[in-house]
Image: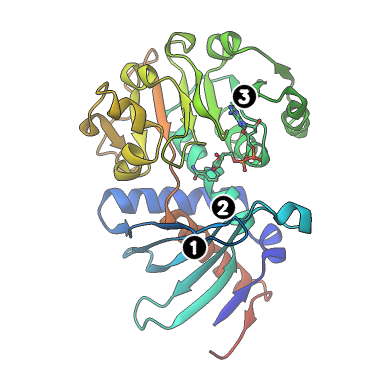
Amino acid sequence: MIIVPEKEIAGLVSEEQAFKAVEQVFASMSKRSAYNFPVIREAIGHADALYGFKSGFDREALNLGLKSGGYWPGNADKGLTNHQSTVFLFDADTGKARAVVGGNLLTALRTAAASAVSIAHLARKDAKVLGMVGAGHQSTFQMRAALRQRDFEKVIGWNLHPEMLSRLEDTAGEFGLPFEAVDLDRMGADADVIITITSSFDAILKADQVTPGTHLACMGTDTKGKQEVDAALLAKASVFTDEVAQSVTIGEAQHAIAEGLINESDIAEIGAVINASHPGRTSDDEITLFDGTGVGLQDLAVASAVVDLAVERGVAIEVDF
Ligand code: NAD
């Protein structure tokens, strides 16, 4: 069995490799060659922790396994990240344990890769202004992966806590791009692509603030009750997602579905666009919205790529198991 510790991940996997792994698995999910098993998430009654598993099997890539982890709110006081996760991979032919891979950085990379895949396939080709709603831990990963998808000339940002916006400015600066803090009217009016990545439980962006032709990647809503954009915006937009079952229950679409504004059949899988069985964006005026809920297969895909790279570069720890 192979172990790839958390500290090795940053030096192993690039954004491009994460993008390819996630794009492949979304395509595989849409062909029904890959499926996610039911998610387990429990408040364990200790250390205020939320703990769970996301798991699945990709028959094309032969990735079988799970991501185990959750949220420990007291970790920051111990000098640890509150979100903790580890990926376990198994040999699909024998069931033998194949690898244990640190999952913290991988979670950020696979989440950023998902919105980047949506931008690559759904945003207008001439998109120039990237809008960021949210400036937390995930936001810099999101921005870096997104900026590679189009010839962006400027980044604009909004955050409930404005003191955090310097993080977005610094990241835009890495790419030599100007950054401007804006209000939500300007966000909707000026941005060609908008990424939302917050822990909000109320709509931040309203439907009438978003202009025709915009692509939105809504990435923060991954739990029942969370919400980042007006439900009416989903009725106005062409809605895409990683997995429809999650989109309507824990994703951004849960609210539009509950209010009867859209039906489950109105939501398309991003994998279908990748496989060209769905046309994706059909006009420059269309608003496209990707509801990125986060599936276990994304974690397995990037972890598997990491294991291959670790073996190739001689940094994998091999143990008899
Ligand atoms: P973080 O705690 O580092 O940052 C939270 C962000 O949300 C900050 O920008 C903060 O200002 C903002 N925020 C907090 N409360 C808000 C409110 N009431 N209204 C508007 N904004 C608010 O978190 P993070 O690690 O950057 O994660 C952001 C979100 O992404 C979380 O909700 C997390 O669960 C989600 N997430 C989703 C996936 C996925 O696959 N879809 C993966 C990882 C994380």
Q: In whole angstroms, how far apart are the C-alphas of marks 2 and 1?
A: 10 Å
Q: Which mark is residue 152?
A: 3
Ranked by sequence position, the earlier of labels 2 and 3 is 2
Is the C-beta separation of discs 2 and 1 under 8 Å?
Answer: yes
* Residue under label 2: 107
Rendered image: mark on residue 248: none
Name the residue that disc number 1 marks.
67
- In the image as oriented, which residue stretches furthest toward the front? 45
Q: Quadrant of ligand 1?
A: top right
Query: Assess mark 2: CB under 8 A from ligand 1?
Result: yes
Of badges 2 and 3, the one in the foreground is 2
Q: Position of residue 280 (x, y in %)?
A: 33, 30
Residue 85 in which image quadrant = bottom right
Q: Amino acid at mark 3?
A: Phe
Q: Indicate the quadrant containing the N terminus: top left, top right, bottom left or bottom right.
A: bottom right
Q: Residue at x 39, y 41 (%)?
A: 250
Position of residue 153 in the picture relative to residue 267 (left or right)? right
Kindly check if marks 2 and 3 are in contact, taking CB atoms under 8 A apart as contact. Answer: no
Q: Position of residue 28 (x, y in %)?
A: 33, 54
> Residue flagged by tag 2: what amino acid is it?
Thr
Q: How would you rate the neighbour count of disc 3 (Cα within 10 Å): few for under 14, some for 14-19, many for 20 or more?
A: some
Q: Distance of mark 1 from mark 3, alpha carbons?
A: 34 Å
Foreground residue among 296 and 148: 296
Q: Secondary structure at mark 3?
A: loop
